[in-house]
Image (cartoon, coloured by chain):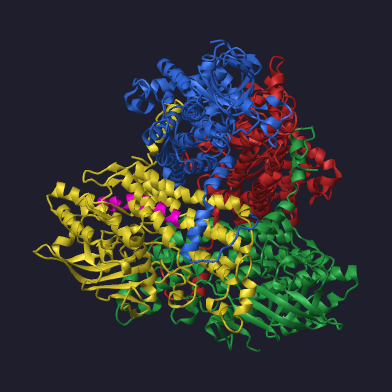
Chain colours: A red, B green, C yellow, D blue
Amino acid sequence: MRPNVYKFGELIEDVTTHPATRRSVEGHAQIFDAAQKEEYRDLLTTTSSITGERISRYLSIIGSAEDMIHNVRMKRLMFNLTGTCTGGRCVGFNAINSMWATTYDMDEELGTDYHPRLRTWLTEAQREDITLAGALTDPKGDRSKRPSEQKDPDMSLRMVEKEASGDIVVRGAKVMIAGVAAANEVFVLPGAGYREGESDYTISFVVPRDIEGLTVVEARHPSDGRDLEQGFDNPVDYGGITQGYLLFQDVHIPKERIFMAGEWKHSTKAVLNFIAPYRSAIGGCVAGQGDVIVGAAALMARANGLSEKVFRERLTQMVVNNETTFGMGIAASVMGKLHPSGVWIPDAKLANVNKVHVATLPYETKRLAQDIAGGIAETGCLPSAEDIRSPKYGDLLQKYLKANCSGETRARIARLIEWLTIGEGVPGCMHGGGSPDGAKLMINALGEIETNIRLARKVANIKEEIPAPGAK
Amino acid sequence: MRPNVYKFGELIEDVTTHPATRRSVEGHAQIFDAAQKEEYRDLLTTTSSITGERISRYLSIIGSAEDMIHNVRMKRLMFNLTGTCTGGRCVGFNAINSMWATTYDMDEELGTDYHPRLRTWLTEAQREDITLAGALTDPKGDRSKRPSEQKDPDMSLRMVEKEASGDIVVRGAKVMIAGVAAANEVFVLPGAGYREGESDYTISFVVPRDIEGLTVVEARHPSDGRDLEQGFDNPVDYGGITQGYLLFQDVHIPKERIFMAGEWKHSTKAVLNFIAPYRSAIGGCVAGQGDVIVGAAALMARANGLSEKVFRERLTQMVVNNETTFGMGIAASVMGKLHPSGVWIPDAKLANVNKVHVATLPYETKRLAQDIAGGIAETGCLPSAEDIRSPKYGDLLQKYLKANCSGETRARIARLIEWLTIGEGVPGCMHGGGSPDGAKLMINALGEIETNIRLARKVANIKEEIPAPGAK
Amino acid sequence: MRPNVYKFGELIEDVTTHPATRRSVEGHAQIFDAAQKEEYRDLLTTTSSITGERISRYLSIIGSAEDMIHNVRMKRLMFNLTGTCTGGRCVGFNAINSMWATTYDMDEELGTDYHPRLRTWLTEAQREDITLAGALTDPKGDRSKRPSEQKDPDMSLRMVEKEASGDIVVRGAKVMIAGVAAANEVFVLPGAGYREGESDYTISFVVPRDIEGLTVVEARHPSDGRDLEQGFDNPVDYGGITQGYLLFQDVHIPKERIFMAGEWKHSTKAVLNFIAPYRSAIGGCVAGQGDVIVGAAALMARANGLSEKVFRERLTQMVVNNETTFGMGIAASVMGKLHPSGVWIPDAKLANVNKVHVATLPYETKRLAQDIAGGIAETGCLPSAEDIRSPKYGDLLQKYLKANCSGETRARIARLIEWLTIGEGVPGCMHGGGSPDGAKLMINALGEIETNIRLARKVANIKEEIPAPGAK
Amino acid sequence: MRPNVYKFGELIEDVTTHPATRRSVEGHAQIFDAAQKEEYRDLLTTTSSITGERISRYLSIIGSAEDMIHNVRMKRLMFNLTGTCTGGRCVGFNAINSMWATTYDMDEELGTDYHPRLRTWLTEAQREDITLAGALTDPKGDRSKRPSEQKDPDMSLRMVEKEASGDIVVRGAKVMIAGVAAANEVFVLPGAGYREGESDYTISFVVPRDIEGLTVVEARHPSDGRDLEQGFDNPVDYGGITQGYLLFQDVHIPKERIFMAGEWKHSTKAVLNFIAPYRSAIGGCVAGQGDVIVGAAALMARANGLSEKVFRERLTQMVVNNETTFGMGIAASVMGKLHPSGVWIPDAKLANVNKVHVATLPYETKRLAQDIAGGIAETGCLPSAEDIRSPKYGDLLQKYLKANCSGETRARIARLIEWLTIGEGVPGCMHGGGSPDGAKLMINALGEIETNIRLARKVANIKEEIPAPGAK
């Protein structure tokens, strides 16, 4: 592929070897490795609803509650195996499914041919088993104004040209896009529900990562300077996060890769179809990292010479947190409904409740891990690997770091907890897939206060009508 | 039925009219009423796996994840309709299912004939559509000692005679048994996992509520004095809790109603088979009452002339709490397994995690309701219905209680919130179906710390073996 | 005194013997008893700043941080001794101090003579050592409208006549007024900050409890039916809450007992002067009851035969909660300022932060107590005292209630926990002295966001000016 | 001074200019700068109780509640000014005061002359206005064993020689010692309460930071790689943390700088005398950083074009958290006692309760900041300063980062939030000054369960004695 990914002001010639992206690529590669293993095959692969072939689950249509449960469990597994996010596949997976339903509806209502286009592209994608990132978030500019009201019209990605052929040219950016460095292609979604007059912003398409006119600049993340170092201060070799800023400078998109181009009335639905499975499955992510955090905390306790018993109450609370986001993801999956297009859409209320948990419980889990692990792990308060191996005083450091295991092993475990709780392994689970505020808005909208008021009135046999103050 | 229920030192001649039990009976009657309605029929009735007839779901075998989900939803519905617990049916329902699996296993391993006995009795029970309470909790005495070590051997219910015919005679008590006053029969379970030497305690059977030798003394509950009053200070007419102390004075149980009699090795399994569905479904209970609490709080805000907007964040949090216990119940249901006897057993870890939530989240929901509803509702701080209707000063009280509705309506709503949060409507969700400590013990036992430690080691490539301190 | 207190539709002839009020009177009497004891004398009495005589602290001017700390500690002590609220003294105490400062300011600014009037009355009150309730809360009516906008102008207490002599006539009500039944006099404060056109609502005065035209109707509280019973189901004999609705039917107030009459510009200050000490000292109340809850929970564990060790983490959390509200009360006390009138006014921000804790932490403390104490205590799930002493089956109940102590003792402890957590002992700490919403409003107003923004800008050396969106 | 500080395997020749230590030195320098300013002088300086001269408060004896309150406020101020910890002064300050009391007691009981030695040294230190770090934490090794039971006897710092002159030679390490790089001297304390047979570990003394035989290796902290970069990715220039590992290779300590040498019976008291003020004052630290976090979150909201109103509830909660740790620090200060040596010792129970809050509340504050600030700030998810200034695509990044301010300013604010919540600014408040587990142990020890049980018994008039299970 054409090198178009940058970090620290420099072009990354080869994302598979450059230290800034290598770990993320390796993390995504774990998916392929695991899919080969007997124990994970059923989770990571499935049968294509299009071709009947065995395909990666990440490129499949979620056709049932069971498929959706597998999605939640798959994400838990991938965090178990890599310690962090392999977002270069799951967002794309969600995007396919969101647009599978949305294009179906558009074609039904508008007589367009988006759905067959998507089917054609997906058939090929499944055959080639590509890694597909997904891009949702626009820069947005001043949040007090709508996309069409911004001073600079480019603050949300938009069509600047619509050719007679049906091809379009797009300008703008998508930001904080996970795993692009590890991806072959990027599936672009409308970043929000748009209104009349915002049809140029209502676009969905898929592009090769190295398409002409696209530049990717990688975001930093905590402690990412250690990626460039030797030693074990970034303690994880086969897992890592990248989040790219995708700069589209008048990129030309051919018609057959376009799945939405101006149909603003359908944009909200496209976003909702994305949100429901995403906010369900993210419960698996958080649980999967939580599993590793529980293990790391217990391991650190052992390394310190302390029994898990001392920390039983806290370890149990951490497990409760993990199982809560996992369980809520499962529940949202099960209580969903089948869309006419064949996509299973999880329950919106439960999915959004899960988003609220995902934005709070992992913080408690991490705090408890730091509590259990002690001062050395809280902020990774120990000398660098280079110091620990210093010929001058490394032996002294190793002597004094030693506890119920060697000094270096104890250092590595402390670094792992730092990585998981205040370092490179921390994913953006608070705002990833939308902010908790948005989730609360939806819960509130779905909360059926009026129904509950009726229940209360009936239980206590209250007859008098009480108007809602301020209502008209 | 023979009158054998007492409260306040007196025999209750007719439980359906006596004010101490009438509301509970009426609450249970709502189940029959609702089952007639088109909208609830599928939830409240099902097809008997034995006879193929339409039966009450409360007397059915839970044969699938879907059945178990219906159980969770049914409990939510019944709290929606009565505002509180109709425990005189759901514990019995759980007991049937627990012993359906347990008797199957016993017969398989021991060659006994308990399972066909249970089937025979259940067939008849389904046909007669009885209301069946369930009895689990023993008095236990000094908790630092096992049942067989107590000074008084009767502190857990036990066989004092096993006749040649297979009949047995039992002595002891079961305490805090929900809904006995509304029940036709009571299904008795072993109260704990028993060990060698405790076979006399390992008993399960079913008795008519008015069997010879059984005396029921009803427990008090908060504000239950109001049951005996006129007026609306107990604001709910068709719903209420009773919890009986069942005193067994050498009660004779015929063989065909005995489902366990000494097989202590199977007692733990019997308890676990009870716990898993109970701790899943209780998520529905708590959500169902939570729905009414949300409605009551919003209604009180209106009555005070305040918009829900002011309380949006809090109402949303209450909905999050409701959906969390509901969702975790659903998740535990779905992730279960089919027992060879045909009973679907929910996932133990998720069910116990839910018990932890059930012991905490409703407290927050109630606190938020009191927060929203204001000082008048916090402890029901307003004069009695009798005062409000006093010919002397009742008009003044009504004048000053008035806000965005009449004074009396506002008083009723305040009483409803008192009833729900610090009065008669509060069920024992913390310890019902076992204490949160027990749930945490199980979560911990199921928590797979070793698996998590392996994950952590693998992620950070930690090779050195670290022995668990204190392990042998 | 003239009998003018009603409950359950009946006149209470003698508040000291009638079961509905007797316990509250006894609770307040404990203050006098304790003041005699060497160990408590310094806390409960002090030297009058007016006369130099030894007086009850409840009638003193709070003249220093140390006085204010003694106030917080005194409230903790009284909850320790009575298990609940003796609000018939502390609100009056607060009212005196609030108006001591407010009258001083009014006289300075307006040339009125309120302050000497108050001094004259207080000198006498100290000499007679009266019990003085305080009355703040108005009925308010529709909360979406201001007092002057209500359909019924009486929804806040108001002057209906101002005589030439300076005497006034008042009409309206004060509601949920603590301890009136135990009081000799009632100190009335303006219920809110008033605006122009609301001067008739801006009144402060003191009246004998039995003044002509005043009727008191007592509010119910949870389980108050038990007051009328024998036995130990209300387990506390020397402590109890009453909260009266005070109906003023054109009550004539002589000039020398009036401390504010129309000066609306000073009403907000009067309220703030009340709030700061009240919301500081309430931390002592909540801690004092929390001490008893900790003791009751630990005692119940013993009664059940369980070691405190099992519950150590939870008992420690309960202590943390107690010390937090106590400590914040102390901190607010210390960080206060001396008003020119000689009254020490605690720090408003810390006092209001404490109100937020007072509205949340006790709920957790009570939940933990129910958790520790088990199912029998959660909702007081055991038969009545009458049943336990029944000649027919009382022996059986006592047998089965027995654990590491007699059945009756265990029953009494369970009732105590019910009383403390879901019964008569629960004070209205959430909304007492104003709602947490009001406290948050004040914290926010005092929160110095702009100062904090300046700090942040300086730390990160951010130069660009960023206007607040929506600001003009 | 002799260069003896290392990081990343290399000797730091000049701590004032080397990027790894420069910011920490600058942070400490802010103390001197601020002390010159009129507005801060009273807080940062005081009168020496020894000489009567104006001295830095950091070298003073805390002689009263007021002094202790100033300590809490001073720490809040320093976090306000530097955004983070200036631990190179406050630990030393605490150490002086702990040993002031401890040496006094030792001299009284044992006839030693430690106290005058300390006074002599302190007089000089005040005169020279030195920066004094404090060193408490030993490596400890296997936590399941006491210091004297470790395989390697050096796991806690110890005397290996006691010379006839009274001089000693010490070997071992002190780890995670704050601000050593910025300090002139280091005050060493016994790291724990020691027992018989552990007198060699019971040592206290003061050394120049560059004493012969002492090597300091700096610990890493999150994102510390950015210290070595240009640009604003470490957004704070005048503040920063260092935490050194101090390796003592047979360091010779002259008698006049030794304040404890073997008196193990006094070691626990020395630790307690350290803990009480430390755990009080740390409430000021956490509040001070919290102030900056509130400001940064509100500023980010503005930068995004959002009104603070949207976030009012959360900003208020953040203020509540800040004022709680601050207030508890104040309360512990006030409720203390004067030690005969003239040192004011804060209340141990309140100080330890504060430690529990310090280990939890800041985590919530940081979570809320990330919630308010959005995805860009959660993990600092934006390109590096170098990218933002790239000639190739920097203009595009700036264009798309722009909102209600320039792109670069928005980037700087996002980096500040990253720095405060998941980066270099995060201090080790969980375990600094001892772990929350230790604090809970002390609260429990001080919790007076027996007293509380007596209160509960008295309130409910419970006569029967109930023995504590398991008690002898």
User: Where is residue C238, by image quadrant?
Assistant: bottom left
Foreground of the two, A326 or A208: A326
Q: Is residue A338 visible?
A: no
Q: Quadrant of the C terminus of chain D?
A: bottom right
Question: What is the x, y in percent for residue C95?
Answer: 27, 56
Left or right position of B145 against C349 = right
Foreground of the two, B104 or A419: B104
User: Where is residue B371, by image quadrant?
Assistant: bottom left
Relative to C101, residue C306 above or below = below
Relative to A459, residue C156 above or below = above
The residue at 79%/61% (across/down) is B337
Question: What is the x, y in percent for residue D364?
Answer: 53, 43
The stretch drawn in magenta includes residue A171: no
Relative to C244, residue A26 above or below = above
Foreground of the two, C271 or A108: C271
Question: How many dots with numbers?
Answer: 0
Residue at the right extreme of this rendering: B111
Magenta-colored span:
C267-288
Q: Main secondary structure of the magenta part?
A: helix
Residue at the left extreme of this rendering: C164
Foreground of the two, B414 or D13: D13
Left or right position of C378 against C112 = right
Left or right position of D339 against A370 = left
Question: What is the x, y in percent for residue B155?
Answer: 69, 71
User: Where is residue B240, by image quadrant?
Assistant: bottom right
The stretch drawn in magenta includes residue C278: yes
Q: Is residue C105 visible?
A: yes
Question: What is the x, y in percent for residue A307?
Answer: 71, 42
